[in-house]
């Protein structure tokens, strides 16, 4: 046990994802039961740190939350205290107010700050660490795109939700001889689309890492028609783009660390395929359904492990680090390193992409004559 720690704080920042409550519960249980530390929850991410919006956490108010989606501490994907919008003389100006956050931590007697977040939230965590705050980072995002860790919690649940959506789209696609396009989240990474596409038996998977040619996707649909399957199901990552084309931006949220909100590529793909193939086509945007609701069992376990490993790091005095999953083992990496890295993306020549292609799934990067391949095997 680390004798210098008496009281810890925990906050959740950025977009929510299934498993956040499981982390809060794990951190609180181990901190209280094994270390006799006090635990303080910081509400609304960095906004709560700035305003001193704190709540004591105990075994009672963190009980029964393992299976709950969202976060009992609320979250914000704005409020970077190093570039915070404040009003001065009636004008909105950007100021570094991080010292206010540090003062609030001191006043609350918080010795270590546990920050559960993605890229943006952990960038601020690193910056607080640089200013001497004892910080432990815990990675979260449904996008699974954080460097240094093999998997983030929330991803498995998002993939499950997307897979179920594909299953449901299959039956209605088949009934109406339609092309059904499912747009999934993932920001600039295609992990959700790739995994759900394989699990849900999609005919095409379009991801940001592999720009597509719509003619190649249409060719696959024609081949299916020739084989007597006059319907198709396509999964499109929100960040997918055509060769020589751009991602579709749905909105710009000015005061967010990453202001770009993607969305709309699914409708474009559906429209283009209807024009090329003749089948009526529909697009479904799965959106925040992927982030809400109860975490999968995989995510409950992963979140719990992350929480426990984070407290262990604090016990060992290893501040300024983020817990990671490496293979089957919990490990850690310095926040400096994690934030310096590029995001983790799908490798177009990886085993998983090759496996999907071998299953007959097209990515729109090459013309695959599925019909000929099938007939050769007769
Ligand atoms: O990073 C998680 C994520 O859900 C992305 O997949 C998506 O692009 C984005 O957040 C949506 O953000 P918001 O909740 O602000 O619409």
Image: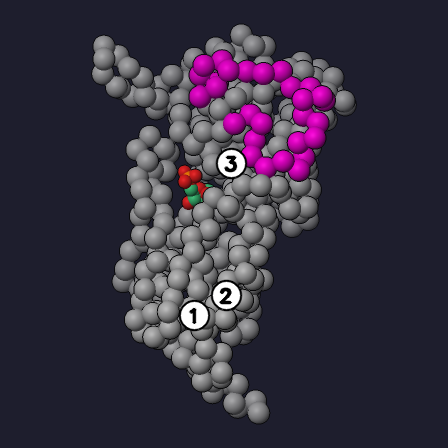
Classify 213 as above or below 49.
below
Q: Secondary structure at mark 3?
A: loop
Q: Magenta span: helix, strand or loop, mainly?
A: loop
Residue at horizontal 46%, vertical 23%?
A: 46
- The disc placed on residue 16 is 3
Using the image as rendered, state which of residue 175 and residue 3 is in the foreground.
Answer: 175
Which is closer to the viewer, label 3 or label 2? 2
Q: Ligand 1 is found in which quarter of the picture?
A: top left
Residue 21 in sight from this viewpoint: yes
On whether residue 3 falls in the magenta region, the answer is: no
Please state the horizontal and vertical placement of residue 271, each as a whole percent of the image. 32, 64
Give SS at disc 2.
helix
- Label whose residue precedes the other's in the sequence (3 or 1): 3
Q: CA distance from mark 3 to mark 1?
A: 34 Å
Q: Closer to the camera, 238 or 39? A: 238
Residue indicated by mark 1: 178
Boundaries of the magenta span: 47-74
The label shown at residue 172 is 2
């Amino acid at each position: 046990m680390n004798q210098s720690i008496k009281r810890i704080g925990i906050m959740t920042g950025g977009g929510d994802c299934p498993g956040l409550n499981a982390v809060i519960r794990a951190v609180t249980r181990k901190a209280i039961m094994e270390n006799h530390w006090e635990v303080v929850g910081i509400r609304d991410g960095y906004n709560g740190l700035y305003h001193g919006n704190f709540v004591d956490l105990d075994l009672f108010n963190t009980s029964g939350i393992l299976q709950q989606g969202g976060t009992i501490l609320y979250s914000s994907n704005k409020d970077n205290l190093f570039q915070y919008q404040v009003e001065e003389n009636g004008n909105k100006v950007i100021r570094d107010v991080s010292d206010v956050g540090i003062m609030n931590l001191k006043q609350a007697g918080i010795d270590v700050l546990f920050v559960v977040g993605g890229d943006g939230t952990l960038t601020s965590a690193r910056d607080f660490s640089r200013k001497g705050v004892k910080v432990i980072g815990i990675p979260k995002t449904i996008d699974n795109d954080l460097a240094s860790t093999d998997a983030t919690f929330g991803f498995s649940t998002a993939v499950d939700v997307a897979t179920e959506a594909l299953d449901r789209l299959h039956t209605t696609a088949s009934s109406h001889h339609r092309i059904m396009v499912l747009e999934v989240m993932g920001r600039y990474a295609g992990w959700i689309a790739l995994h759900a596409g394989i699990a849900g038996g999609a005919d095409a998977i379009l991801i940001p890492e592999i720009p597509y040619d719509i003619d190649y996707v249409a060719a696959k649909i024609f081949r299916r028609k020739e084989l007597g399957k006059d319907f198709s199901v396509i999964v499109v990552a929100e960040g997918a783009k055509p060769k020589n084309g751009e991602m579709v931006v749905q909105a710009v949220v000015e005061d967010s660390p990453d202001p770009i909100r993607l969305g709309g590529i699914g409708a474009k793909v559906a429209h283009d395929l209807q024009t090329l193939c003749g089948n009526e086509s529909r697009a479904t945007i799965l959106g925040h359904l992927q982030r809400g609701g109860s975490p999968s069992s995989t995510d409950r376990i992963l979140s719990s492990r992350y929480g426990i490993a984070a407290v262990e790091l604090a016990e060992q005095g290893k501040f300024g680090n983020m817990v990671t999953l490496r293979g089957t083992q919990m490990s850690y990496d310095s926040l400096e390193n994690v934030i310096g890295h590029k995001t983790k993306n799908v490798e177009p020549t990886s085993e998983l992409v090759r496996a999907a292609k071998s299953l007959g799934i097209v990515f729109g990067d090459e013309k695959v004559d599925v019909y000929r391949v099938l007939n050769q095997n007769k």
